[in-house]
Image: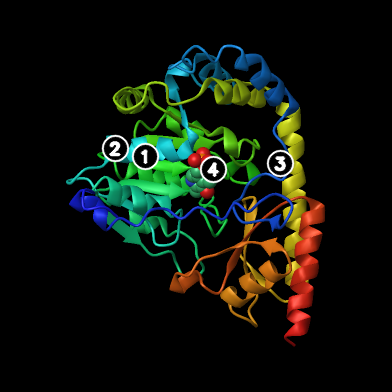
Amino acid sequence: MSKFLVDKYQTIEPYTPGEQPKKGSLIKLNTNESPFPPSPKAVEAIAKAAGDLNLYSDPECKKLVDAIAEYYGVSAKNVIATNGSDESLAFCFQAFCDENTPAAYPDITYGFYKVFAKLYSIDSKVMPLKADFSVDPADYMGINATVFLANPNAPTGMALALEDIEKIALSNPENVVIIDEAYVDFGGKSAIELTRKLSNLLVVQTFSKSRSLAGGRIGFVIGCEELIEDLRKIKYSFNPYNVGALPQAAAEASIRDTEYFEACRKSVIDAREYTVEQLLKMGLAVLPSCANFIFVSPTRISGQEYFAALREKGILVRHFSAPRVCDFVRVTIGSREQMDAYLKATREILEERR
Ligand SMILES: *Cc1c(COP(=O)(O)O)cnc(C)c1O
């Protein structure tokens, strides 16, 4: 750190991304990426768009926004596209939180909420999950804060019912409720429908997980026109060209390729159900997941030991050291072959320690 960094950032603890090892050395189940390549149509669209890179990208992301609006049956005015959904979330923190309006989110959730709160000098109301790791909707009723809920939650994979989301939004008419649906395509129910009638509800989604475009950096927000207008105000005050031309082209082609999307997500869901069944048979504990990852406790050894032993065997998963979750590891659902390798390694690890 230099002496020039301003005081308020000296104590910030940035988000720690999962390791990105060199290709081939490890089976990578640590950052919830898709095991499948992007839609071939997305790859084709990138090649086509590349010839125009001398020009700035479309700041309105019009073709992409139209495609998203069409897919979800909303108007283009209800959609904004961003550079990954992390940027969507950052815009929400900037637009809807300040010194009088704190952010509320669970103790165990996506690590970035805490980082953004600190970055923008926003207070946090951190609400502990219940003992079974579910969100207690009662915690958020009339909370007087901007609510951030990942649904399904990360790293638990557990989902909150839409009725509860509706109740939370209705009980906070003076605050915005932001539902982060990064994993919704793997078994959650989207709150997009609710944004039609609730003018304080926003849904954030990403192309990073279910659409195999993590490296493309595309996210979007859906909500009532006024809220989207607020987010546009932040975007145009920060970086009008926030989404590159290649990612715009890739994402548009991807959302129009329904067949490929459905095949990929079905494959991930099938591999998840298979993996959970095998783990339960072996006596491990697994939280009920609606996502493309599972939260697994080996029960007989610590989460840290399990993580390290899997790594020894060439399988990279994610371990979090926070006290409530340190007995677990988060395992991304990869291809069936990758999951068989993970299950084999797990079987060996438990045998070796019997
Ligand atoms: C992965 C993830 C994101 C961020 O995704 P982007 O790649 O920035 O679109 C947001 N929220 C949650 C809960 C995530 O797991």
Location of residue 152 in the rendering, given as x and y in whole percent from the top left corner: 54, 50
Marks 2/1 in contact by CB < 8 Å: the verdict is yes
Q: Earlier in the sequence, mark 2 or mark 4?
A: 2
In the image, 170: left or right of 346?
left
Q: Nearer the viewer, residue 44 or 331?
A: 44
| Alpha carbon distance from label 2 to label 1 | 6 Å
Q: Which residue is under mark 4? A: 182
In the image, 329: left or right of 266?
left
| Alpha carbon distance from label 3 to label 2 | 33 Å
Above-or-below relation of 156 to 292: below
| Alpha carbon distance from label 1 to label 4 | 15 Å
| Alpha carbon distance from label 4 to label 3 | 13 Å
Identify the amino acid type marked 2. Answer: Gln
Identify the amino acid type marked 3. Answer: Arg
Q: Which residue is under mark 3? A: 265
Q: Residues within 10 Å of mark 2 (few under 14, many from 20)?
A: some
Identify the amino acid type marked 4. Answer: Ala
Q: What element carries label 3?
A: helix
